[in-house]
Each structure stands twice: as structure tokens, then as C-alpha cells.
Amino acid sequence: MTDPKSPRGSFDVAFVGRANIDLTAQVPHRATPGRTTFAASLTASPGGKSLNQAIAAARRGGRCCLIANVGADSWGHQIAAALADAGVDIRHLTLLPETTTGAAIIEVTPDGESYITLALSPATELTANDIQHATGAIDAQAFVVQLDLPPEPVTALLRRRPAPIIIGNLVPHPDLDKALLRHLDVLVVNQHEAAATLHTTNNDPLTAAVELRQLGPRAVVVTAGAHGAAYADARGTGRVPAPTVPVIDTTGAGDAFLGSLAVDLARHIPLTDAITTAVHIGSMAVQQAGAQVRQA
């Protein structure tokens, strides 16, 4: 971790987005309308896309920080402790008084698939002022931003370009000016997010990568679960296969992928090599429950 006495943090990667508590239930099947499904257990653990990615990056040996807001409640303190224990700098994780931390309700079925409902806490959403304050105090090689955040903080970050490498993740907020995607060095989405962004039913990751690059990002990576990932950049296109592994829980596998990818790109590893390593990391993550926090 960075010296807390340093007035300006120096990092490989800064992650910008949300942190929440994951309420995870292992269920034999999803409930049908009017019926109840009994879960074997319920766990409450730190989660959220950006938190998961930051922890994955730290476990890869990356120097990283998280820019996010949570409530100053028991969940918020649990999140802060988990990040600190994982080696993530938390000086830009703000605990807001009299505010409830958001939660994700996750159902995991026996085939390892996860079904997630995110209960946002509007008061914890980042603002443009949060971004301006944090980016002015951070020296990082790469920033990773959740594009589904409210458009104001995303716009502030993309226009400022506070690092040599800017990575965007998730389907952009519907009110975000799509022209801003030209500020992205890399756009990373899964094949379902790619289809939603392109308003298509075509789930071929390579086709999606090529079409998404036409929106302006310098490079696009589309993950496809057991089928690995596809990419498109100025040098060409390609696919990176994933190894065949037993799947226990897919929750957080994409975040493990992105955390690894961001660290390698920040360290100037070529994109194709970084993707190959990230696919391996993601494949490791699906082989255990709760992988989003413990495995990277």
C-alpha cells in the first residue's frame, strides 16, 4: 500500500465506481411466481464491481486504490476493512454519515450461475466533485471507471483524462454522451453487456468487439465466460480461449479478469498477453464460491 503520509498517492491502477455488500444465497433453483425457494445459507460479504476489481488487482501485486462512497454503517466499515486487509488504498473511500450502504442480492444456482439484483443507495453515488477532488490527489498509470455510474462523474473523469490509460467497464449510462467513449483506451464488457450496448441480439464476442470499437475506444475486449475473450484494436482482432474448468460460482469472475488486465496494462504488458493472463485468472475465480473477494 501507499505511504498514508504521502499527500499524493502513486498507484498502478485507480478504480472508480461502487462498493456494496453482497447478500449471497445458494439456491437449488430460482423461485417461480408465487412460490418460495429455500436457500441453504446466506452470507454477507463486501462486493461491488469496482471493489472486486480493486481487490483482484491488489492480489496480483498491483498498487491500487478505490474511489467510491459507502455509508458509515456496519456494512460500510466492513467494506473498508476488507479493502485495507487486501492491500487496497482506502483514502478515497468515503464513509458518509447517516447513509445506508447499497446491497446486491445474489442467487447462485447449482450450475454456478449467479442472478444479481443491485439495491443502490442513491446517496452514495459518486459526483463530479468527488472525481475532481480524488483525481487531483492521485498519480496512477491507469484508471478504471464504471460507465453505468451517473453521467456527471463519468464525464468529468473522461474529459480530464487523469492517467495515461483509461479503461471503461459496463454498459454506459443511457444519458452518457456516447461521443465520450473516444476518450477510452480500452472498453471491457461481457458479451451480454456488449449486445445491450449495441442494441443487438448477436452474442458473438469478436463481432461485438469490432463493432464497439467503431464507437470510439482505441481497443475493446469482450469477455465470453467459458469461451474466453475476444478483442479488437488498431493492430487487429483475435480470440483468447479459456481452459475447461469446473464451475462453482461465476460471481466476480469478470471482475477478477478486469483487475488482472488493468494491472498488466498499467505495467505496459501488451494487450494480447494481458488478456491471456486475465482469462486464466477469471477461470481460477469461478472454481470457488465467493471468489470475488478471496481469489484474484
Image (tube, rainbow, N blue to C red):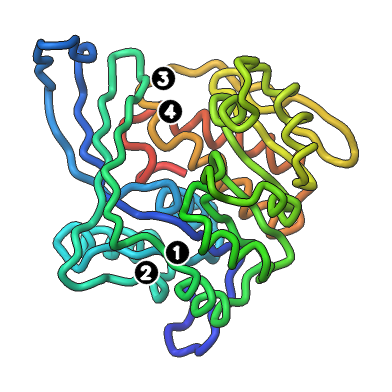
- Say what secondary structure mark 1 lies in: strand
Q: Earlier in the sequence, mark 2 or mark 1?
A: 1
Q: CA distance from mark 4 to mark 2?
A: 27 Å
Q: Which label lies toward us, 4 or 2?
A: 2
Q: CA distance from mark 2 to mark 3?
A: 32 Å
Q: Position of residue 270 (x, y in %)?
A: 79, 47
Which residue is at 54% across, 64% downward?
14
Tags 1 and 4 touching, CB below 8 Å: no
Tags 3 and 4 touching, CB below 8 Å: yes
Circle 4 packing at 10 Å, graded few (<14), some (14-19), many (20+), is many
Which residue is at 55% across, 55% downward?
145
Circle 2 packing at 10 Å, graded few (<14), some (14-19), many (20+), is many
Q: Earlier in the sequence, mark 3 or mark 4?
A: 3
Q: Which residue is mark 2?
A: 93
Q: Which residue is mark 3?
A: 247
Q: Is residue 115 above or below residue 169?
A: above
Q: Which residue is mark 4?
A: 286
